[in-house]
Image (cartoon, rainbow, N blue to C red):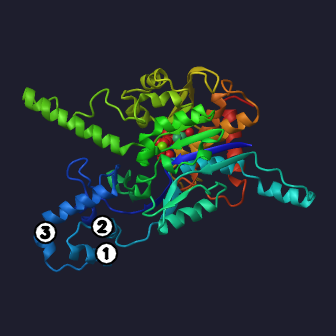
Amino acid sequence: MITISGTGCALMDYLYTDIRFDSPAFLKYRSRTSGDGGLEPGKLVFVEDLERFAGKVRAERAPRIMAPVRASSASATADAAAGSPPSFDHILHELTGGREPARANLGGPSIVALIHAAQMFEEDASRDAENDRNSHALREPPGVRVRFFGARGNDSSGDELALIAARTPLDMTDCVVLDGPTPFTCVLSDPTFDHGHGERTFVNELGVAARFGPEHLPAHFYNADIVAFGGTALVPRIHESLGTLCERAKRGGSIVVVNTVFDFKSEARLATSSEAENMRNTRNTRNTRNTRNTPAKIGARWPLGANDETYQFIDILVMDREEALKLSGTRDIDTALAFFKAKGTGAAIVTDGARDIRFFSSGGLFAPIESGRLPVSAEVTRLLQSAERPPGDTTGCGDNFVGGLLRAVAAQREAGAAKGRLDMEEACAEAVVAGGFACFYIGGTYFEASPGEKRHRIELLAKLYRAQRGRQ
Ligand SMILES: Nc1ncnc2c1ncn2[C@@H]1O[C@H](COP(=O)(O)OP(=O)(O)OP(=O)(O)O)[C@@H](O)[C@H]1O
Ligand SMILES: [Mg+2]
């Protein structure tokens, strides 16, 4: 039996629709200068930074706040009475008017990818029924076992996360429950923003993910055919140790897969250091014209683990375009791919939304490919542009893409393909279809009507994609 172990980001996504970014509440908490902790359309802030920012806003408005105010929630009253910065509960209440989220779904680049892989290996419900009818023989055990090793908190979001995960075939036995809040992202959506184009603003709570570290990963985590690290930038202690963890998994003979997420912490650090540098330059040259608003220094990049050695312990690295450029400190995909190759990464894939994916393999796991490219699914594009467009969003496309990749690698190994001979293009094709399918529903996790349903729908899409590529 093939086993997949995964760790990294798992969180609850709460979607609030119709939050006007020009409302008084939003404007009150809107950032004054980029990176100050205030809300920024299209960007993500952390709860702790937003609360700090809100404290400053309150201090600025102190004389008015001291007048009797009608607090809109119990926590608001408590906050005001204590003179402490407003809690996120209070801020959210102001922003949403106390509405419940329109949608809650399980998200996160680790757990969503693993759930997809598990769903694709699930026994077909109809086949099960057939087995039961035809014989009393033991059912064939599933060929692949997918396990999540991460953390959730002991709060209501944590219960929700566990309930959703329990509706999927992912093995959650090794998900630990830590004392504290479950990680979440609040997605505030304003469809009217930017002349009707719409925009989203994100607020993330790291919660117990801030405390989850290498010591929480038991020995049997590494005892798997595939060890996958997903979105570890949102699990900072795992992220800092990523090199050591990948090395251990690789030395143990596992296939190591890493998929990234936007690294807001590193991005903030780069922005601060480039700002400091600009100030120095400004002082030195007394010439502000060319130095103001310079983006992060050219060549500056996000770290991945303690140092660049991490790359050589990764068999497959999956990033979206922006992450690839930020990690490599480059400005185009070709140079980024060359960077990952030079650092010793076994294979790397860069996704780019509706545009072609790009990839290479140096030969350790997949057969070598100097430079590969695949289009996205034309059937997905067609459906998205058609009248029968299903309600959905692109949340989790990248995460499900990785799920498709994990399934393909596991399936190829189970079918007996030796390391160094796996077919990367076929694996990527499966990933493209899985990523595209995520456009057809809201959030990252797909709820199956019955086991095998998702696989059935993906297989139909995969057939069309094979035809698109001129394959049988
Ligand atoms: N509009 C689209 N049409 C068809 N396929 C898409 C579309 N958007 C995404 N996909 C599929 O999903 C893959 C990953 O998408 P993308 O590059 O947006 O990932 P991402 O930025 O990591 O997404 P997220 O982090 O929200 O999961 C694409 O390579 C493609 O196969
Ligand atoms: Mg992504």
Q: Farthest residue in the left direction?
A: 286
- The residue wearing badge 2 is 87
Label located before the other in sequence (3 or 2): 3
In this view of the protein, which residue sits in the foreground, 90 or 314? 314
SS at circle 2: loop
Report whether residue 171 is seen.
yes
Image x and y of residue 66, in percent: 13, 75
Image x and y of residue 159, in percent: 53, 67
Report how far apart the C-alphas of labels 1 and 3 lie in the structure.
18 Å
> Which of the 4 quarters of the picture holds residue 227?
top right
In this view of the protein, which residue sits in the foreground, 311 or 404? 311
Badge 3 crowding class, 10 Å Cα cut-off, few under 14, some 14 to 19, many 20 or more, is few
> Which of the 4 quarters of the picture holds residue 137?
bottom right
State if disc 2 and disc 3 touch (CB < 8 Å): no
SS at circle 3: helix
- The residue wearing badge 1 is 75
Image quarter hosting the N terminus:
top right
Name the residue located 46 percent from the left edge and 52 percent from the top edge.
212
Name the residue located 44 percent from the left edge and 35 percent from the top edge.
321
- The residue wearing badge 3 is 62
> Which of the 4 quarters of the picture holds residue 183?
bottom left
Report how far apart the C-alphas of labels 3 and 2 lie in the structure.
16 Å
Image x and y of residue 307, in percent: 40, 31
Report how far apart the C-alphas of labels 1 and 2 lie in the structure.
8 Å
Relative horizontal placement of residue 12, taking residue 65 as reference (left or right): right
State if disc 2 and disc 1 touch (CB < 8 Å): yes
Label located before the other in sequence (1 or 2): 1
Name the kind of residue labelled 2 in the image. Ser
State if disc 3 and disc 1 touch (CB < 8 Å): no
